[in-house]
Image (spheres, rainbow, N blue to C red):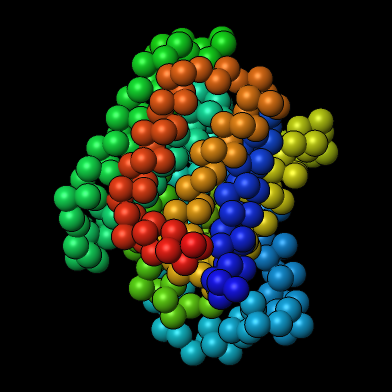
């Protein structure tokens, strides 16, 4: 049996659960403003992650390194880096993501999400001096062409051409912010317990969101998201799936399989999201959108071509 098979299964589960969460967040976005929805899902995730940490001693090998003593032994600046990563990658990026999702829908947003892979490579080159090869540029070009193809189609119902372009730009900025936020924390994540890192990042982003919400003239409307309402039917399960389960599955995949395999399998979110958007929210599955999906996935495979070959050989 392939020893990395459990990790690959977890990576696919992460992709599937995030796709489901996107659909639920799309429903929530019809009633809840993006910043309020981001704050809500982060607040829901924190106690769940805290319970996971409490359960760590009985959770087996998956959470064997999640001791508080190990966190205390690390330099305090590591915590501040994780907090900064959360402010950029969660407070800013996720808010931009929800704005874009509200404007263009699940299908196009999932295509724009593929920009995350080349963005990570770019910031890794810029900040960590990792090498870029011609295939990185080819792959990034294919993914960018996918976004351009998607933007050229008919806007979703009740959406203008300007709103379509704005939504795509916001999604691209979200992916860039998310990639920058995770890359600046990469060295810290190599030493930090993963669940603790996730909790600190989300806590940092949540505090930043709460501070902004308190300063807004519409703060009463933002905080009203915590009063039980019909929106909870989608926002609560969306938070459970997207901010907690998908992340825990990603962590499990990261532990039991190579990071490169996770990058490939996690990107299958675009396939799950397109299918779910067509079935549940009745988004049209056009030829243009299918072409954009093919271009985006091809771009990801080109960028990660060496890892793809390794994965195919291991499965065979």
Q: Quadrant of the N terminus?
A: bottom right
Q: Residue at x 28, y 44 (%)?
A: 139
Residue located at (65% from left, 32% from top)? 276
Image quadrant of residue 296? Answer: top left
Residue 148 location (% of width, % of height): 32, 25
231 vs 304: above or below: above
> Looking at this view, is 88 or 220 the one in front?
88
Q: Position of residue 93 (x, y in %)?
A: 45, 45
At which x and y percent is residue 132? 19, 57
Q: Report the label total.
A: 0
Asked if 296 appears above or below 316 in the picture, the reply is: above
From this viewpoint, is residue 241 visible?
A: yes
Q: 191 above or below 98?
A: below
Which is more toward the observer, 56 or 201?
A: 56
Within the image, what quadrant is residue 288 found in?
Answer: top left
Q: Position of residue 35 (x, y in %)?
A: 56, 38
């Amino acid at each position: 049996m392939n020893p990395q098979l459990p990790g690959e299964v977890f990576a696919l589960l992460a992709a599937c659960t995030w796709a489901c969460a996107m659909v639920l967040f799309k429903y929530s976005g019809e009633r809840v403003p993006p910043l309020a929805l981001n704050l809500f899902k982060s607040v829901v995730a924190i106690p769940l992650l805290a319970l996971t940490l409490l359960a760590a001693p009985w959770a087996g090998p998956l959470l064997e390194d999640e001791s508080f003593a190990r966190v205390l032994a690390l330099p305090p600046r590591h915590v501040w880096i994780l907090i900064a990563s959360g402010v950029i990658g969660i407070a800013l990026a996720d808010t931009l993501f929800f704005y874009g999702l509200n404007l263009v829908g699940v299908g196009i947003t999932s295509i724009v999400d593929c920009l995350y892979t080349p963005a990570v490579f770019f910031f890794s080159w810029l900040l960590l001096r990792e090498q870029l090869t011609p295939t990185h540029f080819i792959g990034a070009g294919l993914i960018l062409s996918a976004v351009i193809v998607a933007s050229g189609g008919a806007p979703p119902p009740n959406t203008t051409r300007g709103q379509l372009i704005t939504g795509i730009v916001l999604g691209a900025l979200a992916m860039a912010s998310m990639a920058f936020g995770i890359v600046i924390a990469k060295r810290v994540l190599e030493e930090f317990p993963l669940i603790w890192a996730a909790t600190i990042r989300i806590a940092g982003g949540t505090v930043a969101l709460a501070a902004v919400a308190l300063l807004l003239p519409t703060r009463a409307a933002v905080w009203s998201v915590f009063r039980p309402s019909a929106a909870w039917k989608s926002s609560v399960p969306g938070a459970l799936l997207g901010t907690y389960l998908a992340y825990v599955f990603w962590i499990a995949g990261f532990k039991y399989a190579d990071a490169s395999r996770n990058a490939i399998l996690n990107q299958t979110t675009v396939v799950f999201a397109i299918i779910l958007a067509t079935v549940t929210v009745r988004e049209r599955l056009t030829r243009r959108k299918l072409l954009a999906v093919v271009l985006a996935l091809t771009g990801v495979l080109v960028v990660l071509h060496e890892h793809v070959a390794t994965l195919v050989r291991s499965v065979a």
